[in-house]
Image: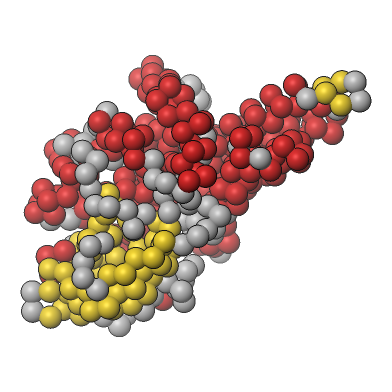
Amino acid sequence: MDFRFTDEQQMWHETVHAFMEREVGLEYIRKHDEAREFPDEAYQKIADRGWLGLLIPEKHGGLEADPVMYAIFCEAIAKYSLDFAAAIMTSMFTATNIAFHGTDEQREKYLPGFMEGKIKFSISITEPNAGSDAAGLRTRAVQDGDSWIINGNKVFCSGAHLPGTVIAVMARTAEDKHTGLSMILVPNTTEGVDVRKLDTIVRRSLGTTEIFFTDARVPVENIIGQPGDGWRVVGSHLEWERLSLAATYVGNARTALDDTIRYTKDRTQFGRPLSSFQVLKHRMAEDECEVEAARLMVYSAATKLARGEKALKEVSMAKVFAAKTAFRVATNGMQALGGYATLPEYDMERYFREAKHGMVGGGTNEIQHSIIAKQMGL
């Protein structure tokens, strides 16, 4: 089995990494993380290159990249921050719901503006009493003539507060737990939509929110697919989301480990570099093994998706393993850097914070284990 990138894939890998190093950079990431500001300039640079359209079919104006090319992109844009990557990817994989399940009118209305960077998307599923049990949500949408009227409460909806954002809201339109769910597009400027940014230790640039819907009214044509299609629509969304998240954990873990190696080579204690001490040397060697294993799992899952096969088990395996790897590497980095690890300018505390969130966001490790077990017939 040949694990090498093709020439096209290698060129794409080098292009995106060079973009991150030259057009974005660590100082930019630190600044926006500390200020809790969305990376507008970098986001627009990505839009100007056409990269927001990576997952959009060519017939709708996108690049129609395959899952391997998308994984390469996600791995690269996360090298300095998982939050920065989420700020780009959240709109990208939410837009696929419109591209693949929306009407022609919805695609014409939203996709060109999205690919130009003028429209952003956020997806809202989680509620205070419906997290891992996502289908247990209570937010309701009732049809009233030519409108949907939405009432309910959502939480941890990343990016919903940003200007020009359209929220893909999962709401209950019938009583059945799964087939009673529908996905409805709700601009965040809609009357009756109250979006409140949360002061979390992660998602500091992208931002995550709590949303209150009080008789929020949107046109009936804002539904994606038919009433009751929401659970089916989000199923394909989650495969892309979990692949992208797993790839970002690998990209960020690689940087965290490289930073640890560099620091331990430069830092001298007891007359010799920290990297010469066996306890640190072996710990970093083990981290290297896990980062490489996680990376292979990501590209194995991406390759299966690229063949047009279902990869629910594989993306869940890649996500849970890569998330644990990123957290382990960042934790070991915190230990190796000691007091310096707590300073923002050393970046490790950001890697650590964001990696911990990776074990929860996009489906907890426990939920991934349940999905894997089900696919095993257990």
Residue drawn at x 13%, y 54% as measured from the top left? 106
**Can you name the residue that lies furthest to the bottom here?**
175
The answer to whether one can see residue 24 in this image is: yes
Report whether 176 appears left or right of 303.
left
Q: Is residue 376 above or below residue 193?
A: above
Please state the horizontal and vertical placement of residue 270, each as a whole percent of the image.
91, 25
Report whether 277 appears left or right of 338.
right
Residue drawn at x 16%, y 64% as measured from the top left? 222
Q: Which of the pair 195/150 is nearer the observer?
A: 195
Q: Is residue 78 above or below residue 147?
A: above
Please state the horizontal and vertical placement of residue 371, each as a whole percent of the image.
50, 60
The answer to whether one can see residue 139 in this image is: no
Image-quadrant location for residue 214:
bottom left
Report whether 372 appears left or right of 265.
left
Please state the horizontal and vertical placement of residue 230, each as a whole percent of the image.
28, 66
Q: Is residue 91 above or below residue 153?
A: above
**Can you name the residue that lies furthest to the front here?**
35
Residue drawn at x 24%, y 52% as measured from the top left? 164
Please state the horizontal and vertical placement of residue 56, each as a whole percent of the image.
23, 41
Q: Is residue 260 above or below residue 304?
A: above
Q: Which of the pair 55/314 is nearer the observer?
A: 55
Image-quadrant location for residue 127:
bottom left
Report whether 194 appears left or right of 130.
left
Residue drawn at x 27%, y 70% as measured from the top left? 193
On the rendered image, what quadrant is the C terminus found in? bottom right
